[in-house]
Amino acid sequence: QLQASGGGLVQAGESLRLSCVASGRTFGGYVMGWFRQAPGKDRELVALITWSTSTTYYSDFVKGRFTISRDNAKNTVYLQMDSLKPEDTAAYFCAAGFVRSGRWLLSRPNDYDYWGQGTQVTVSS
């Protein structure tokens, strides 16, 4: 249902763009989130976008460096990652969570209903 791609090995300061293709259903009324998980750490929210209004939210540690966007025609959500740092190294996951009772700021992994497989991002110093 969700297929993530675009990870790779880059040097600090470089850029990557992750893609998440949604298939099998429509995601109107959903929030699309990007999470990341480094070894030994909890999965954390990177950014999210509402499918219907494109409202966005970024965690503080990526503000000004990452940009989330969506292309309705392609059923795809992107995460443009610029000025990458070694601490951005992690497996990145896309996820879809249904907006219930108007609550769109879905910050916890348990808020999400569908998950893609991870794509590894490694940033060398």
Image (cartoon, rainbow, N blue to C red):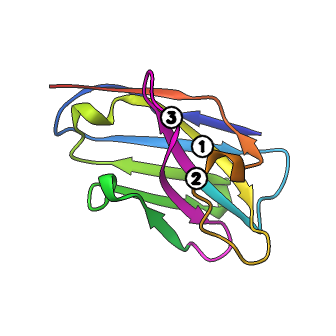
Q: Quadrant of the N terminus?
A: top right
Q: Position of residue 46 (x, y in %)?
A: 45, 50
Q: Give the range drawn in magenta.
A: 33-54
Identify whether 41 is placed above or below 108: above
Left or right placement of residue 57 versus residue 80 in this view? right
Q: In the structure shown, which secondary structural element does the residue marked by tag 3 occupy?
A: loop
Observer-nearest of 51 and 85: 85
Q: Report which residue position mark 3 lands on.
A: 42
What residue is rendered at 51% in x and 28% in y? 119
Q: Where is residue 28 in the image (x, y as percent from the top left)?
A: 77, 66
| Residues marked 1 and 2 touching at CB (< 8 Å) | yes
Distance Cα–Cα, label 3 vs label 2: 16 Å
Q: In the structure shown, which secondary structural element does the residue marked by tag 2 occupy?
A: strand
Distance Cα–Cα, label 1 vs label 3: 15 Å
Q: Report which residue position mark 1 lands on.
A: 94
Observer-nearest of 41 and 24: 41
